[in-house]
Amino acid sequence: MFQRLDMAWLDIMTIVRSSHLKRKVIPLLVESQRPRVAFVKQDVQDDLYCCPKTSTRADVIFSTLMRTGPVALFTRMGAEFLLVETEPDAECQAWAEKATDLHWYDLQALQQLRSSVPGRSHGQSAFAVRSDTVDWSQYDIVISLDTSIPARITRQYPNTLWCYYIREPKTRSYAASQTAPLPGQDRFLDQSFALRRTSSPRHVLKFPYYLQYFGCFHSLLERPTHDGSQRATIFLEHHTPETMSPDQLRQLAELGPVDSTAKESVENDSFASPNQKCRRSSQQIVSALLESKYFVACPKRRNLWGNAVIEAVSAGALVIGDPEVHIHRDVFSPGTSCRSFNELIQTLHHFESNPAAYQRELLRQRRMIDHLCFWRPVHELLQALQQHRRSR
């Protein structure tokens, strides 16, 4: 009972805070007022975008090598994307820690992305430019995946706010960035989106890797938003199918078509092994999510950061799952939390027979994601820009 009252209070406060932030941010996002933003990555990165600078916003997002990433930078903030050659400076080597420190990747394979991207007729060097050939003064904010621009260049443009993600939170560069920004940078974007705030140094911004909101994918693909009642698909998070037996998957299929990033196609009923990457394109996955009524995330043996949850809610699906395996779990309420397959089936039956309850939870999740993954982080980014300008 107390948990439900606490959740209801948090929901009310989220709506109030979000409305307050929206009133502040919306005027600053008008095309004539919004800051000029660039999003940058190196030619050895195996995630996010691979396309020319002149690409449309949809072409940028769906050129990704893996994840959809900070979509709202392009749909709401008019950001430009730049691919740059990897510089030898020490502060630009965070990309290698995934291989040298964590041993999750092969260093040579990452370097080969310059000349060849799997499944494509080109490498990333086809679109990469040298950092010292760009006039960075044309941007108010530059956001980098890892640290792409060396300090010897960023220091030539003191009026620009230099921000960066460290892609892997388990690396030493991520840990070091919690204490101080890497050389030549102003703000560290830590990827978090928790409702309850913890204190952090001034240079750290709570800024999700998936800067998204409900409707951002509809905008990219020019599709109307709707209440979800016309949807039917039950979409499983990539690692969730491995915890389910064939009989359990059949039980789900009795409630609606079952899909997943672990499926090569909707027509193919087999799922990939736990270690196999999805072979479907990002646009195919997003298109499937736009038709999904539910997104189920119960991987059991694996903890999740929560990015897939952001993407699912942004695409319009209701997320159901086990909050205990999510590092960021505020999107879940008691009504959408399931810790066993039997609870999952009961929850799905409940929502199928109670459309009003489904709509209430859907609206709650959309408000939560809009607040945590767009309005609040964008407001803090714009505040950081103002502070940076005052300091100059």
Image (cartoon, grey):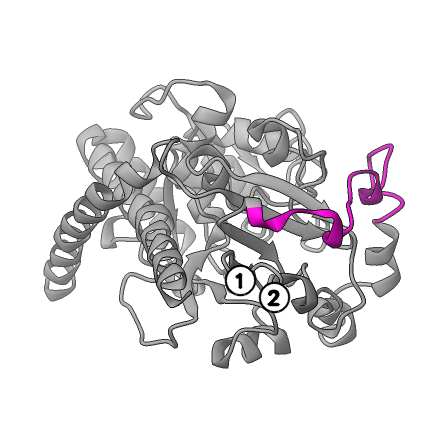
Q: Which residue is mark 1?
A: 158
Give how far apart the Cα atoms at labels 1 and 2 are: 6 Å
Q: Residue 117 in the image: state x and y as whole percent.
A: 82, 42
Residue that appears at 23% across and 43% down? 22
138 in magenta: no
Q: Amino acid at mark 2?
A: Arg
The secondary structure type at the circle numbered 1 is loop
Which residue range is magenta in the image?
A: 114-137
| Residue 243 visible (yes or no) | no
Given residues 267 and 392, the one toward you in this image is 392
**Is residue 121 toward the left or the right of residue 29 in the image?**
right
Q: Which residue is mark 2?
A: 155
**Is residue 293 toward the left or the right of residue 265 in the image?**
left
Q: Amino acid at mark 1?
A: Pro
Q: Residue 136 in the image: state x and y as whole percent.
A: 61, 50
- Packing grade of label 2 (10 A; few <14, some 14-19, many >=20) is some
* Dots 1, 2 in contact, CB < 8 A: yes
**Is residue 149 toward the left or the right of residue 100 in the image?**
left
Q: Quadrant of residue 359?
A: top left
